[in-house]
Image (cartoon, grey):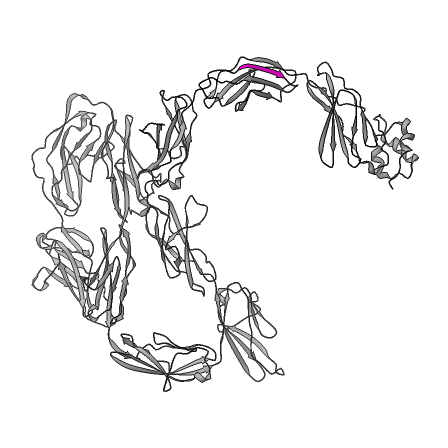
């Protein structure tokens, strides 16, 4: 008994089978539901024509599945679709394609023409597979079966074309080659005629660089979850080595496999992050070549929003919208009862609008989203209703209790199609609108600030064109319940407002949402006062609810309640995802978080990239996202940048916590839209044009393969010369050519480019080519020694030379001394300072510009002066009479190695004004006129040709108001204590605080003179 076979084909798929296959099953995959048990009928169509199963012995249905026995290619090939229907309407399934796999024989079995090649040359042997259906695999036989060609770095069999590639032919390759074609569905094999490979006798082929013969297309659409195989092989001598990389520099994940000596790159389970540009590089010692192509991510449609069963009244309007994601973006169509929609209906993308419904619009509707990778259906039933009012399903409550002062809402919701018009009666009196009574358009009655007079019987009367119905309720007044609203973090006191006889013993307790509050355990938030009031501190969201104050007395138990509504900022949104992204926009969707007692009023979107510091707010469309929206489009993004997004909700209380970030998503690439800035340049050496610019930041490069285009022309000419730099971080380009005139103006501009194209050029800047150094040396150079540390150099400015002069440089021909001094501008003198004393310097001068210094003048000799004496003036005497200060000191005598003393410099500093006065004298004394109301500091220096000598110790002259007389001080080597003792003997009442003025006065012969005139301050 033969074994029974069958194939299961799910709708929306494709399968290849062989003819005379024993059994074939088509599964319907349709699920219908209804609140009413109802018989469902199913039929099948082939190529749009219903299949008549009654007269077909090979086809029958079982449980909705179509079973086909003994398949025949001519009768069973085509598109199948299941159609389900009942009294509510009709829907159709996805389509399934049934194709028959086959493999014909090769057209000719004659021996193929011989292929003649030289040793070392590369060769391609074509397979030319016969007509077929179904996936093929290829192999090659060498000479005779079962000797198959083994693939390695030198031999490659393409599973795309079937051809055999030999990178470098060797003598062992001579023979007959037969292509073997295998159909993976039918498992049939066909062999081609042999192809002889013959070596030519005209010598061995020399070495040559790789030539890529097998490469993948420039653009490869790759479906999500599919297995992608990229082939690459090159001919060359020596045999080329194949390597792969992503041009973005991102390394391959571990799932990527290299096969057949790197001739095949395999990416299983293809995902969004695998998209990008891939490059195959073939290299040998003669050179290398590369082929690249872009893998773009494609995905079949997936529902974001579907349609639901809807019941509407006659003459109402219908609006249905379905949304799907997919790559490419899906297109939409609509079906009613399995047929395309026609008149009276407005269709725009995934939205369907029907105005003024009538009974004939009832039925089963399907929204269809489709791209080249798949098709999906969303089905829903539309019921158009027409009936008189009825309260059987929604009668008014028999009794409604309300507290005094509250607002009562009485809903009148009869079932009616179209909606009924409602009016209200209290007793037999028709209610009219007033300040307290509101009649809403949906039939609802609201009574504000209710009182005992509002109690009674209320009747709702509903009417439409099909009939009238009534319903009655009674209203009774109850005690008012207080409702308090508060913000998270605040505090509140809930009073226990119950009056009791003061003679009774009263105890208070509080319950929260039916549970007694434990004030010992919950003292962090809850506190009860002596009067029974409840204090709640630092309120949190979980403190919202019903609070009841319970009062127990000797004679009764009472209670009063309050509702506490706690409001806080909204909780974080969730499930932020990027539905669609371009080079500058990203469409986001998210789910709402908790509103925490205050409705969400809006959302804001933030983004983060590797180039930003933390999260930054971004612009969206719409600009203001209200609280009812859960989608938005982020705009003004940078191309080819990896983004993360998060969403923050807000309400009247404040901003909530941000959502978790979305998955990282890269914007698409595009041509650069930012030109380089700060274009300029100049300088360099002879025959050079140097151009500089500020590099474009990485986040503005907009794609891979980034570089710069530099355009330049001599000012006044028309044609631009272009140069290309492929290094993104470079900010300088130098053009060298012996024909470039020195210091000539050029127009320059710079643009950026990437793999997508060229961006805009910068504005034109004027840049001068490199100039030549000055051709002449300065003349009439003279040097003069000014002091022990300074030499002045003077020269005559250069005038009639063709080169530009930006300044001058003074050199010392002994580089271990001063080195070089540069002066920018038209200077003709320079002061060289910080020199060594009594030292010979050999000096020259040169002019300079951006090309460098010109020739130096002949060196001239100049020797600095001997150093000034290193000793200060000693034995300084001073006398103050009135406003005249007399100073005298011993002369300073220079040694043989020092400059001769030419005079003395007296420095006088007045404390009040902090100013300095200098007096130059050739004597060893001086008289100064000073103010009696100021303090002074005096120092004295010797002067010489070598400069200023050492300074004396400072002399402090205090204002004369402190003493009636200031005495003379002479410096002698006598201990200070000696004279102090003598002064105290002379004037025992002299205050100790005044001794400091006299501590330097140590001459015994003047003791009586010094002490006698001293008078104490009044």
* Residue 848 shown in magenta: no
Residue at the image position 42 percent from the left and 29 percent from the top:
681
Quadrant of image for the C terminus: top right
Q: Does the image show residue 4?
A: no
Where is residue 76 drawn, in percent x and y? 11, 55
Q: Is residue 251 left or right of residue 83?
A: right
* Residue 780 shown in magenta: yes
Where is residue 272 drawn, in percent x and y? 31, 47
Q: Is residue 292 left or right of residue 619?
A: left
Q: Does the image show residue 708?
A: yes
Residue at the image position 30 percent from the left and 44 percent from the top:
275
Q: Which residues are magenta?
A: 772-785
Q: In front: 465, or 660? A: 465
Residue at the image position 39 percent from the left and 39 percent from the top:
698
Where is residue 958 drawn, in percent x and y? 80, 35
Q: In front: 830, or 628? A: 830
Q: Is residue 328 left or right of residue 919?
A: left
């Amino acid at each position: 008994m033969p074994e029974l076979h069958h194939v299961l084909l799910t709708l929306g798929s494709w399968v290849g089978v062989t003819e005379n296959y024993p059994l074939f099953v088509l599964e319907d995959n349709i699920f219908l539901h209804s609140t009413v048990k109802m018989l469902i009928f199913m039929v099948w169509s082939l190529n749009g024509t219903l299949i008549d199963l009654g007269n077909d012995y090979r086809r029958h249905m079982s449980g909705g599945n179509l079973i086909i026995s003994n398949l025949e290619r001519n009768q069973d090939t085509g598109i199948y679709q299941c159609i389900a229907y009942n009294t509510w309407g009709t829907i159709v399934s996805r389509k399934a394609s049934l194709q028959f796999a086959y493999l014909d024989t090769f057209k000719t079995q004659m021996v193929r023409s011989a292929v003649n090649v030289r040793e070392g040359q590369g060769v391609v042997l074509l397979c030319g597979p016969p007509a077929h259906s179904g996936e093929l695999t290829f192999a090659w036989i060498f000479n005779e079966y079962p000797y198959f060609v083994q693939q390695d770095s030198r031999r490659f069999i393409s599973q795309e074309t079937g051809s055999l590639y030999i990178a470098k032919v060797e003598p062992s390759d001579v023979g007959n080659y037969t292509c073997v074609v295998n159909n993976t569905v039918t498992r049939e094999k066909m062999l081609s005629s042999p192809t002889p490979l013959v070596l030519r006798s005209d010598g061995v082929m020399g070495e040559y660089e790789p030539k890529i013969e097998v490469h993948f297309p420039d653009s490869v659409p790759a479906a999500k979850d599919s297995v992608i195989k990229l082939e690459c092989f090159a001919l060359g001598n020596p045999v080329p080595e194949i390597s792969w990389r992503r041009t973005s520099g991102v390394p391959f994940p571990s799932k990527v496999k290299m096969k057949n000596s790197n001739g095949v790159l395999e990416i299983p389970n293809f995902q969004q992050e695998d998209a990008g540009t891939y490059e195959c590089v073939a290299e040998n010692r003669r050179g290398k070549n590369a082929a690249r192509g872009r893998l773009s991510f494609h995905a079949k449609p997936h529902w974001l929003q579907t349609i639901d069963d809807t019941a509407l009244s006659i003459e109402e309007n219908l609006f249905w919208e379905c949304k799907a994601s997919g790559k490419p973006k899906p297109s939409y169509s609509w079906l009613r009862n399995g047929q395309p929609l026609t008149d009276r209906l407005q269709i725009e993308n995934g939205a369907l609008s029907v105005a003024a419904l009538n009974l004939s619009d009832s039925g089963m509707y399907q929204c269809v989203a489709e791209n080249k990778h798949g098709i999906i259906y969303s089905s829903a039933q539309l019921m158009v209703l027409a009936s008189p009012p009825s309260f059987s399903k929604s009668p008014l409550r028999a009794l409604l209790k309300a507290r005094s002062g509250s607002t009562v809402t009485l809903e009148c919701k009869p079932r009616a199609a179209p909606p009924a018009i409602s009016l209200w009666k209290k007793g037999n009196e028709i209610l009219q609108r007033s300040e307290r009574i509101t009649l809403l358009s949906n039939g609802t009655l609201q009574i504000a600030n209710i009182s005992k007079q509002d109690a009674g019987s209320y009747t709702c009367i509903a009417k439409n064109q099909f009939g009238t119905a009534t319903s009655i309720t009674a209203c009774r007044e109850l005690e008012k319940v207080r409702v308090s609203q508060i913000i998270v973090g605040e505090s509140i006191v809930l009073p226990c407002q119950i009056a009791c006889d003061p003679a009774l013993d009263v105890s208070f307790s509080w319950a929260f949402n039916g549970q007694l509050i434990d004030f010992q355990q919950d003292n962090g938030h809850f506190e009860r006062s002596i009067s029974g009031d409840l204090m709640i501190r630092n309120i949190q969201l979980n403190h919202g609810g019903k609070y009841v104050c319970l009062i127990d007395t000797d004679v009764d138990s009472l209670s009063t309640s309050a509702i506490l509504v706690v409001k806080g900022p909204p909780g974080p949104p969730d499930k932020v995802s990027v539905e669609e992204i371009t080079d500058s926009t990203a469409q986001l969707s998210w789910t709402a978080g908790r509103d925490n007692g205050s409705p969400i009023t809006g959302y804001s979107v933030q983004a983060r990239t590797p180039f930003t510091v933390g999260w930054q707010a971004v612009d969206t469309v719409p600009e203001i996202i209200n609280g009812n929206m859960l989608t938005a489009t982020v705009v003004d993004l940078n191309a080819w940048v990896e983004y993360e997004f998060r969403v923050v909700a807000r309400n009247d209380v404040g901003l909530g916590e941000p959502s978790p970030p979305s998955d990282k998503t890269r914007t698409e690439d595009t041509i650069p839209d930012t030109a380089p800035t700060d274009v300029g340049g100049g300088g360099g050496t002879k025959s050079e044009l140097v151009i500089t610019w500020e590099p474009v930041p990485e986040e503005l490069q907009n794609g891979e393969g980034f570089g710069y285009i530099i355009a330049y022309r001599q000012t006044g000419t028309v044609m631009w010369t272009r140069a290309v730099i492929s290094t993104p971080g470079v900010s300088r380009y130098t053009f060298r050519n012996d024909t470039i005139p020195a210091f000539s103006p050029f127009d320059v501009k710079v643009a950026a480019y990437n793999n997508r194209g060229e961006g805009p050029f910068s504005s034109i800047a004027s840049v001068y080519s490199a100039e030549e150094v000055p051709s002449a040396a300065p003349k009439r150079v003279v040097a003069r020694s000014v002091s022990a540390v300074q030499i002045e150099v003077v020269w005559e400015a250069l005038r009639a030379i063709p080169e530009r002069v930006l300044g001058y440089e003074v050199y010392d021909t002994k580089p271990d001394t001063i080195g070089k001094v540069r002066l920018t501008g038209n200077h003709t003198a320079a002061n060289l300072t910080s020199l060594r004393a009594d030292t010979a310097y050999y000096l020259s001068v040169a002019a300079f510009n951006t090309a460098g210094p010109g020739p130096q003048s002949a060196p001239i000799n100049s020797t600095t002066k001997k150093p000034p004496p290193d000793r200060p003036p000693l034995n300084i005497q001073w006398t103050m009479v009135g406003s005249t200060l007399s100073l005298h000191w011993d002369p300073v005598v220079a040694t043989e190695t020092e400059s001769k003393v030419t005079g003395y410099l007296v420095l006088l500093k007045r404390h009040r004004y902090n100013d300095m006065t200098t007096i130059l004298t050739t004597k060893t004394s001086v008289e100064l006129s000073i103010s009696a109301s100021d303090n002074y500091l005096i120092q004295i220096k010797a002067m010489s040709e070598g400069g200023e000598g050492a300074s004396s110790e400072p002399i402090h002259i205090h204002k004369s108001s402190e003493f009636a007389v200031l005495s003379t001080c002479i410096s002698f080597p006598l201990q200070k204590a000696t004279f102090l003792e003598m002064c105290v003997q002379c004037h025992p009442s002299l205050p100790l605080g005044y001794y400091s003025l006299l501590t330097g006065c140590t001459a015994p012969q003047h003791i009586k003179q010094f002490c006698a005139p001293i008078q104490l301050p009044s």
